[in-house]
Image (cartoon, rainbow, N blue to C red):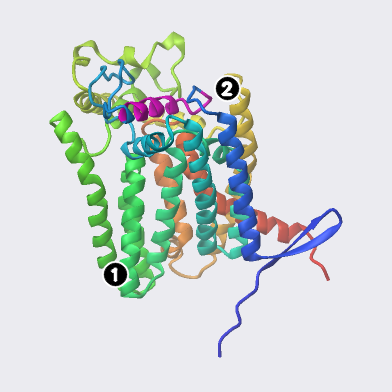
């Protein structure tokens, strides 16, 4: 005897009239609103790539895409950030996002507004839907719909959706990678396992080409998949793992070979980790990290020693990484204290006199409002799991909540140990949203009386 499926329906009261929506209609409505808000953001940012709060890098991506369309490849016409000389190759910026932008410019002319609109539609739809599915898999359909609603109105996501930067697609790629990982963990069909392995490999490959920092989380991701499968007493995901690894390698290899041909040295993906680690842990900070150097502290270029400035971008990146690691070896206590000092910069939710009005509004009206719900959601999720009689920690770790919490912890730690900016935290915000939705559902059930 089969149990009938639960029919989820939602009632909305507008202008003293009550409307009943199916779960599908409600979700499609939320997605439509999400896209609409992101289109407004794209139009607000306009048809020029200018410096705006938090999205300065769009100027670089725009310049690089125009150079590619003009036939000069991945290079700049003038000496450029960080220490790239005019006309010389650069691998500092995401190849994949630059190619997306260049493709749009090639088809429609150098019109940033077209690129903004396209990615606003794509990201508005995909990101909202994937967060719904992640939350549905982790908690329930109700929590999934609440998560989609939070995502639709989350000001940071609305703002960055129109920025000519990697963040919109990168966050979407992370969310989809986590979603497919949960599917693999819960799958017992070997044929389906291979298909999911393909999906995960493609998702991770695209995500890595947008930002290579995700590479550091991969050991934890695959370890979680194996632990989750083992806990369910399913066969271990050997085939899906090998397929995913193979596809990830296929995404990385062409970029590595391209970089080898240009720099004559191994550069796996991009030349930015060395610069970031060197600057992020420089002794100029002492034990107190400053997200953006003040004028009194000098410029980032001034911190690069004169004797290594003759090196090309890739060689300099590797040399600066070596020197950054030496900073840690020379004074590990300072490094630990400096890493802890990055916590306020990373989790900042309050307004600041040093920030623009737009930044303050975005910060307090998104993360500032949602943080209490996110924390409470984590608390009730842990409490519920902890009531299990045996293997509490193992069962929590092997659950979808365990994967989301692992990502939040590991990804945050990576940035606290290197360089902390609010926009680097945005993938964590996205993964925290299902917990916020769980909290809202719990509070609603506790304090809103039900109809008799």
Q: Which region shows up in magenta?
A: 52-68
* Residue positioned 36% across, 17% down in the render: 300
**Could you say where residue 202 lies in the image, as x and y percent from the top left?**
33, 54
Res 236 label:
1
**Could you tell me residue 313's position as x and y percent?**
23, 24
Category of crowding for the residue at label 1, using alpha-carbon neighbours closer than 10 angstroms: few (below 14), some (14–19), many (at least 20): some
- At mark 1, the secondary structure is loop
- Which numbered mark, 2 or 1, is in the foreground of this view? 2
- Identify the secondary structure beneath mark 2: loop
Q: Is residue 103 visible?
A: yes
Determine the image quadrant of residue 384.
Answer: bottom right
**Which residue occupies the extreme right position in the image?**
16
* Residue drawn at 20 percent across, 21 percent down: 312
Looking at the image, the residue that sits furthest to the front is 108
User: Picture coordinates of residue 141 (x, y %)?
Assistant: 59, 64
Residue identified by numbered label 2: 355
Q: What residue appears at the point 70 percent right and 56 percent down from the top-left corner?
A: 443
């Amino acid at each position: 005897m089969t149990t009938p499926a639960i029919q989820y329906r939602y009632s909305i009261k507008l202008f003293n009239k009550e409307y009943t929506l199916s779960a599908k209609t409600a979700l499609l409505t939320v997605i439509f609103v999400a896209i609409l808000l992101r289109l407004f953001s794209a139009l607000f940012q306009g048809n020029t790539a200018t410096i705006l709060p938090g999205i300065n890098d769009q100027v670089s991506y725009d310049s690089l895409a125009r150079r590619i369309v003009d036939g000069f490849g991945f290079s700049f016409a003038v000496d450029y950030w960080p220490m790239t000389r005019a006309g010389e190759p650069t691998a500092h910026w995401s190849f994949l996002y630059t190619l997306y932008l260049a493709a749009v410019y090639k088809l429609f002319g150098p019109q940033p507004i077209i690129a903004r609109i396209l990615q606003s539609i794509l990201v508005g739809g995909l990101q909202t839907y994937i967060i719904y599915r992640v939350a549905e898999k982790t908690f329930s359909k109700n929590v999934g719909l609440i998560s989609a609603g939070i995502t639709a109105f989350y000001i940071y996501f609305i703002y960055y959706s129109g920025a000519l930067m990697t963040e919109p697609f990168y966050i979407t790629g992370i969310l989809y990678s986590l979603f497919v990982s949960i599917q693999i963990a819960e799958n017992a069909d070997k044929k389906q396992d291979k298909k999911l392995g393909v999906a995960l490999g493609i998702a991770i490959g695209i995500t890595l080409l947008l930002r290579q920092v995700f590479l550091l989380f991969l050991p934890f991701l695959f370890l979680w998949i194996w632990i989750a499968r083992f806990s369910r007493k399913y066969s271990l995901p050997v085939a899906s793992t090998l397929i995913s690894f193979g596809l990830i390698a296929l995404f990385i290899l062409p970029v590595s070979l391209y970089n080898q041909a240009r720099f004559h040295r191994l550069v796996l993906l991009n030349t930015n980790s060395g610069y970031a680690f060197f600057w992020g842990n420089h002794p100029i900070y002492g034990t107190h990290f400053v997200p953006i150097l003040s004028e009194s502290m000098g410029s980032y270029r001034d911190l690069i020693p004169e004797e290594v400035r003759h090196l090309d971008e890739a060689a300099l990146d590797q040399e600066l990484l070596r020197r950054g690691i030496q900073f840690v070896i020379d004074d590990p206590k300072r490094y630990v204290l400096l890493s802890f000092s990055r916590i306020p910069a990373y989790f900042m939710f309050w307004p600041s006199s040093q920030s623009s009005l737009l930044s303050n509004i975005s910060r307090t009206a998104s993360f500032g409002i949602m943080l209490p719900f996110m924390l409470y959601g984590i608390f009730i999720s842990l409490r519920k799991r902890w009531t299990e009689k045996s293997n509490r920690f193992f069962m929590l770790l092997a659950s979808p909540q365990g994967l989301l919490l692992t990502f939040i912890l590991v990804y945050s730690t990576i940035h606290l140990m290197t360089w902390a900016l609010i926009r680097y935290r945005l993938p964590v915000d996205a993964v925290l949203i299902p917990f916020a939705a769980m909290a809202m559902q719990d509070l609603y059930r506790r304090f809103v009386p039900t109809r008799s």
